[in-house]
Image: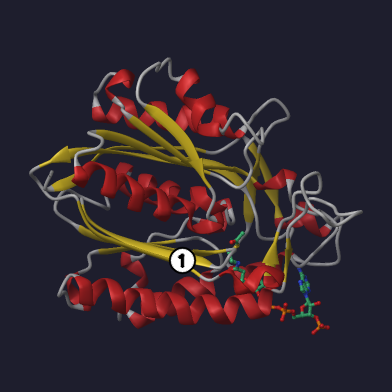
């Protein structure tokens, strides 16, 4: 048994192309002001034609490896969280393992929509604490632009592409303090992206559909509860949290969670203004950004949380 899974590196990648709200309002009936007021988003990044989930994951992963100053083959478990893998199989985890030149250990994908990186952190923590793995790479990587219906103004304003990575290693020093993950499969019809080739239904398109208003309400309630659950499990008070790193779906959902924590927005990492919702990548992209710009420092207590299709939701409390 190992005491902790400690964060030893982070990384992130955003594709070069910027798609602004003005660009979107040229093709669907919306406006920059409507989108910004309702979501907090101004622009998002779009992957180039030759980019894939694993190519973006590789760039984010290499940054994390460089920060940790380890050799890639020290990694004995790779978990890629994605809803947009380039293949049904082989998984993006195996593709990433090969890209990193690693021939040992194990790699696989997990699919928990926007909660994917939190589910990945949960697994990494369990593997490390049990002694089953020593060094674990968790990556969230998404090309949402390819599953977005660019004629649907209810969803096309929200999503973006990107990859975030975190490396964890067995340590006697704190690290991950606790993780909490949940799912409830009753809500398929509120937020869904079918796989037309594998579905029993005919004439499907493989695009995201969402009843945004209903998702919004469940997300706010659920994230409030996960905050309470995480604090109670660690016998902590709201004031013990230094940073909130939320999934970047909508600024109003983020603000509601910060309010629940009685936390000033100065202590909430927000990236969605110029990234949109990058699904499983968003929490790790935000975490990486705040680590690299010096906001999150060693010893800080950081609450990461997410909510996504399924529904899935979860949190990870980390002493950085
Ligand atoms: N521009 C202008 N008008 C719009 C747009 C748009 N882009 N989209 C919808 N509208 C209109 C609607 O047609 C509706 O018009 P009506 O009143 O005439 O019928 C009106 O605006 C209000 O629509 P709502 O859907 O009620 O708008 P809402 O305030 O809920 O905002 C939004 C929509 C931004 C999508 C919001 O509901 C949201 O962010 N939901 C949560 C998203 C989320 O958290 N997803 C989970 C994670 S994603 C994942 O897991 C993959």
> Considering only vertical position in the picture, is 283 above or below 82?
below
Q: Nearer the viewer, residue 307 or 35?
A: 307
Q: Does the residue labelled 1 lie within 8 Å of ligand 1?
A: no
Ligand 1: give its quadrant.
bottom right
On the rendered structure, is 176 left or right of 54?
Answer: left
Left or right of 36? Residue 297 is left
- The quarter of the displayed image where residue 192 is located: bottom right
- Residue 263: in sight, yes or no? no
Q: Nearer the viewer, residue 130 or 76?
A: 130
In the rendered image, residue 258, in percent from the top left (x then y), is placed at 37, 75
The quadrant holding residue 306 is bottom left
Residue at (58, 65) in percent of width and height:
310
The one nearer the camera, 60 or 18, is 60
Residue 215 occupies quadrant: bottom right
Q: Provide the residue designation for mark 1.
A: 313
Identify the residue shown where x is 66% and y is 47%: 144
Q: What element carries label 1?
A: strand
């Amino acid at each position: 048994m190992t005491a902790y899974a400690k964060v030893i590196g982070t990384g992130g990648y955003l594709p070069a192309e910027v798609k602004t709200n003005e660009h979107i309002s040229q093709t669907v009936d919306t406006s920059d002001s409507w989108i910004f007021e309702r979501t907090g988003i101004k622009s998002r990044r779009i992957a180039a034609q030759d980019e894939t989930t694993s190519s973006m994951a590789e760039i984010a992963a290499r940054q994390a490896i460089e920060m940790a100053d380890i050799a890639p083959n020290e990694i004995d478990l790779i978990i890629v969280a994605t809803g947009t893998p380039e293949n049904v199989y082989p998984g993006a985890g195996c593709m990433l393992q090969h890209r990193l030149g690693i021939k040992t250990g194990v790699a696989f994908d997990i699919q928990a929509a926007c909660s994917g990186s939190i589910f990945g952190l949960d697994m990494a923590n369990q593997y490390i604490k049990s002694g089953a793995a020593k060094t674990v790479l968790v990556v969230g990587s998404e090309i949402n632009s390819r599953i977005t219906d660019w004629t649907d103004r209810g969803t096309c304003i929200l999503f973006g592409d990107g990859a975030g990575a975190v490396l964890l290693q067995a340590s006697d020093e704190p690290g991950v303090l606790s993780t909490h993950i949940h799912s409830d499969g009753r809500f398929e019809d509120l937020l869904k992206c079918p796989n037309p080739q594998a579905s029993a239904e005919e004439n499907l398109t493989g695009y995201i559909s969402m009843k945004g208003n209903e998702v919004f309400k469940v997300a706010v309630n659920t994230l409030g509860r996960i905050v309470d659950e995480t604090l109670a499990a660690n016998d902590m008070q709201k004031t013990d949290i230094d940073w909130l790193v939320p999934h970047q779906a909508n600024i109003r959902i983020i603000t509601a969670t910060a309010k629940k924590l009685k936390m000033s927005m100065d202590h909430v990492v927000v990236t969605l203004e110029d990234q949109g919702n990058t699904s499983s990548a968003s929490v790790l992209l935000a975490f990486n950004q705040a680590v690299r710009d010096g906001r999150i420092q060693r010893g800080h207590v950081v609450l990461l949380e997410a909510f996504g299709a399924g529904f899935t939701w979860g949190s990870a409390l980390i002493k950085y």
